[in-house]
Amino acid sequence: MNYINHFIRGVPFSKSKSRGDLNAPARWKASVIEQTLHQPRVTDACVLKATFLLPPDKFPSDLPYGSDLDNLLKLFLDALNETVFSEAKGKDSRVISLTVMKTMVSSSKEADVHLEILPVKLR
């Protein structure tokens, strides 16, 4: 497997949404699947790094530090299980180390996820 360094364009969403556009998570998952279809398949252990670049509306007054990383990551990994991890037994259980962060960008046009996956030889 080669190193994957890929930007997935669009505004990231959590798996569940309680306000606003309730269909946005499903569209985001479909977009991640579409944008990672042609990435290499990961079948061995790997290190995954995801940087969520979130627009200002993902930092409302009741969530001044933005959407929860664990919720953003869950939907994102579910989508990757259908593409990048689709041929791996145990799917995203191949990830042995995970680095996740979020940062604010100035607009929805700049929103995306920077995905990096690095293969690891365990033996």
Image (cartoon, rainbow, N blue to C red):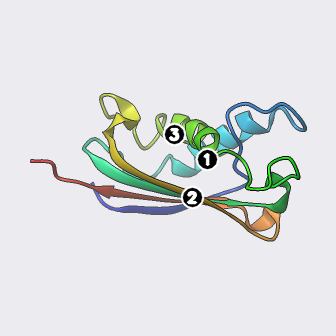
Q: Residue visible at 82% across and 67% down?
A: 107
Q: Secondary structure at mark 1?
A: helix
The kind of residue tagged 2 is Met
Q: Position of residue 47 (x, y in %)?
A: 34, 53
Q: Earlier in the sequence, mark 3 or mark 1?
A: 1
Q: State the CA–CA distance, disc 2 to disc 1.
A: 7 Å
Q: Earlier in the sequence, mark 2 or mark 3?
A: 3
Residue 70 vs residue 86, the one in the foreground: 70
Mark identifier at residue 77: 3
Q: Is residue 120 left or right of residue 49?
A: left
The kind of residue tagged 1 is Leu
Q: Position of residue 84 (x, y in %)?
A: 42, 44
Q: Residue visible at 72% across and 47% down?
A: 67
The kind of residue tagged 3 is Leu
Q: Secondary structure at mark 3?
A: helix
Residue 90 lies in quadrant: top left
Q: Residue visible at 26% across and 45% down?
A: 45
Q: Secondary structure at mark 2?
A: strand
Q: Position of residue 118 (x, y in %)?
A: 33, 58
Q: Earlier in the sequence, mark 2 or mark 1?
A: 1
Q: Residues within 10 Å of mark 3 (few under 14, many from 20)?
A: some
Of the 4 image quadrants, the one containing the N terminus is: bottom left
Q: Nearer the viewer, mark 3 or mark 1?
A: 1
Q: Most extreme residue toward the bottom, as rendered?
A: 106
Residue designated by label 1? 69
Q: Residues within 10 Å of mark 1 (few under 14, many from 20)?
A: some
